[in-house]
Image (cartoon, rainbow, N blue to C red):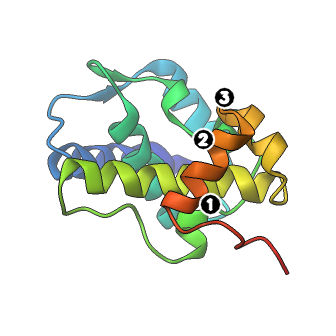
Amino acid sequence: RSADVLPIADMLLAQACEALARPGLCFGPDVRANLLAYPWPGNIRELKNEVFRAVALTEGGAVSPAAFSSRVLHGQPGISAAAQTGGAVAQSGSLQERLDAIEAVILREALLRHRWNKTHAARELGLSRVGLRQKLARFALEGQGDG
C-alpha cells in the first residue's frame, strides 16, 4: 500500500544508516515524492535494496534522488538484479568488498536493462566499452548474457 511506503522507507533508512555506518542521513522531499510515485513491484525487498543502495551512494547529509536507480526515478518498474538473486548488498565485509558488491549490482542492472548490449550499457554508465569489459571480467559477469 502506498500509505506504508514512507514509514517503511524511513525504517529501512535507519537500518541502512546503522549497517553502513552512515548516521544522520535523511530523505529529501524529492526522494519522498519519487518513493510514493513508484509502484514497488518487488515489494519490501526492492524498497530495501534501493534504500541501502542510496545510502551507500550518498555523500553528504541528505539522500538525493540521484542515489536511486533510474527505474525508481522514472517510475519504470522492474526487478533489480539484487532482487532477482534474492539478496541485498552485503552487510558485512570491508568497505572495498561492499563497494565491489554494489558496483557489480549496478553493472548487472545496466546490462539487463540493455539486454546485455555492452555498448549501450557502457554509454549509460559513462564508461568506455573497454572499461565496461574490464569491469565485467573483474566481477566475473562476462558472458552471463550469452545464450
In what quadrant of the picture does the N terminus appear?
bottom right
Q: Quadrant of the C terminus?
A: bottom right
Tell me if 71 is positioned left or right of 35 in this view. Answer: right
The image quarter in which residue 27 lies: top left
Coordinates of residue 8 in the picture (x, y in percent)? 39, 52
Label 1: element kind: loop
Q: Which structural element holds mark 3?
A: loop
Q: Would you place residue 81 above or below residue 20 in this image?
A: below
Q: Which residue is mark 3?
A: 126
User: Can residue 66 be seen?
Assistant: yes
The three-letter code of the residue at mark 3 reads: Gly
Which residue does the numbered mark 2 point to in the structure image? 69
Q: Which tag, 3 or 2, sits closer to the chain's start?
A: 2
Q: Position of residue 94 (x, y in %)?
A: 17, 55
Q: On the rendered structure, is 78 left or right of 45?
A: right
Q: Residue placed at 84% from the left, 53% from the top? A: 117
* Position of residue 127 measured from the top left corner of the image (x, y, whole percent): 65, 33
Is 123 displayed left or right of 56 in the figure?
right
Q: State the separation of the CA atoms marked 3 and 2.
A: 15 Å
Name the residue nearer the viewer: 15 or 132: 132
Label 2 residue SS: loop
The answer to which of marks 3 and 1 sits earlier in the sequence is 1
Q: Hey, which residue is sitting farthest bottom in the picture?
A: 147
Q: CA distance from mark 1 to mark 2?
A: 9 Å
Counting from the top left corner in percent of width and height, residue 68 is at: 54, 37
Residue pointed to by mark 1: 80
Picture quarter containing residue 89?
A: bottom left
Crowd band around label 1 with a 10 angstrom C-alpha radius: few (<14), some (14–19), many (20+): many
Count the marks: how many? 3
| Amino acid at circle 1 | Ser
Is the C-beta separation of discs 1 and 2 under 8 Å?
yes
